Image: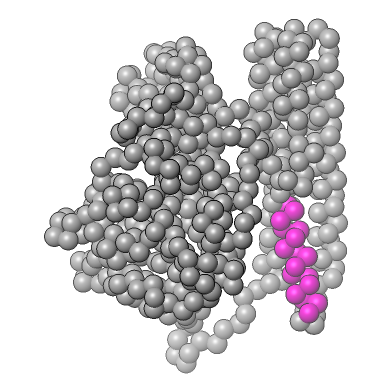
Amino acid sequence: MKFEQHLALITIPSWSEYYLNYKHLKQVLYADASLSGGEFQAQFEREITKVNQHFCEQDESARAQLDSLRAQWHVDMEAGDKEAWKAKFTQLLQQLEHLADYTQACVTGCRKILKKADKVSGQTVSRTLGPMVTSLQFAKSEAEEELLREARVEWRKRIAAPALTAPTGSTVQQIVPEIATVTELELAGFPAGQVSRVWVALAEDALGLPIRVPVIVARGATAGPVVGITAALHGDELNGIPVIHRLIGDVDLSTLHGTLVAVPVVNAPGFHLSQRGYADGADLNRVMPGKADGSSPEVYAYNLMHRITRHFEYHLDLHTSSRGRANSLYVRADLTDPRTARMARLQNPQIIVHNTGPGGSLRGASMQRGIPAICVEIGDPSRFQKHYANNALLGITNILSQLRMVPDAKSVPEFAPAICSHSFWIYARSGGILTVHPDVATWVRAGEVIASVHSVFGDLVEEYFAPQDSVVVGKNIDPVCRSGNRVLHLGVVGDSLPGVVNSGHL
């Protein structure tokens, strides 16, 4: 995926006209590749001036608002005034978060267009124009991040948690109501028009205590499909958790037709250990549907299928890349099945990879039960990435809209995703220090250098070349490389879809 398409994905709509116009700059560059006319430099300077002006205006406005809100606050404010103050401060925090994201996107755009200008012109344009960028306020400081931190501190000082009265003789106060633990999930028992929370026990630990997973059930006011959303099947793949929280928090139960069943953390033992696998290291996504009398992870998988996922009529399994790797926002789905092909497209990812699923996967086990299921890969592990999560949430809302579970408000992407007939990994033949050159969701051409390995002494050991035109689905970002390590995950746009394809996993 080209950078201008990636930029469209992360652009804050109300600020769209103020972003660096990367697409226009690229057109100007190709129209005068030798740069002899000076038009590229003139247009580039105009763009960065525009970006800097918007940044300075927003920064000045935010600082003035923060000072004003500080002055307005006093401890004896009426309840209504306090709520109005909180609403204004919340808007300020959102403005500052937008400003931080805007700055990062524009700085990245400058870096990429100058790199392209160097390549196209054969000159060192970046050495001349790069210092112009770094001299401007939006690129040379972290003012917006510092102001955001300052505002968050102010918020915590003013909006403290309400005082709690602890029980006599205790220093602990129960804040969250006790949530019941069950061994069977009976959807009919949950009240319509409400969000319910429950722990579902799937196994027992060595103390005989239940190993539980959190389940959120949102039943609409009227009947409809049951859509299941699972996250953190691999315990360190976390981006799906805020997606679920946002989805449940935003849904209007009065207009919801059907039921959402969300499991924010499927692999509870792995989540506790901040690791991909189950407690014993086993990959839960290779033991589905499990066995009632099997190994510990097989029993856990069996109970997950029989106690929770059997209720699903549609299934979205949310993942990220593995540790040490980076992913695009992409979907794996069986594109020969019209139901899952439609779900994949509605998800509005950067890339769709046709994949019928490996043996033992949760997605595959759902499909075998006749439940249409897709896997949504949302960025990188062990972190929350707001833009990826926001766009994954929009895609899920599209699917719910298509199923007529929520009002029709589908989001149409500004670009079409790359649809790949299959994908594959490039593996390292030599050990050393790995550098992978292309970014995720970008295209590489056959014969292009995509990675290199240097020795610990700094000597070039080996280079890797793209075997064909393809899109970068994911990449290794860990420079410590052993022979056999994965380097780059490439997706191929083909003319036909294989009946069975399980490549490109893990």
User: Is residue 81 positioned above or below 97 on the image?
Assistant: below
Determine the residue positioned at 73% across, 10% down.
33
Q: Is residue 1 visible?
A: yes
333 left or right, relative to 277: right
Answer whether residue 91 is magenta in the image: yes
Determine the residue positioned at 48% across, 22% down.
470
Q: Position of residue 221 (x, y in %)?
A: 53, 74
Residue furthest left in the image: 293
Q: Position of residue 130 (x, y in %)?
A: 73, 23
Q: Nearer the viewer, residue 505 or 192?
A: 192
Answer whether residue 350 is magenta in the image: no
- Residue 64, located in which quarter of the rendered image? bottom right
Q: Position of residue 170 (x, y in %)?
A: 45, 86
User: Is residue 96 positioned above or below 17 on the image?
Assistant: below
467 left or right, relative to 441: left
Question: Where does the N terminus fall, quadrant-wise?
Answer: top right
The colour scheme applied to this rendered structure is: one colour
Question: Where does the C terminus fall, quadrant-wise?
Answer: top left
User: Is residue 330 positioned above or below 182 on the image?
Assistant: above
- Secondary structure mainly formed by the magenta segment: helix
Report the span colored magenta.
Answer: 80-96
User: Is residue 83 positioned above or below 270 on the image?
Assistant: below
Q: Nearer the viewer, residue 332 or 205?
A: 332
Label count reads: 0
Q: Is residue 320 visible?
A: no
Determine the residue positioned at 68% across, 44% down.
101
Q: Position of residue 2 (x, y in %)?
A: 61, 27
Q: Nearer the viewer, residue 464 or 334?
A: 334
Determine the residue positioned at 80% across, 30% down.
48
Residue furthest bottom in the image: 168
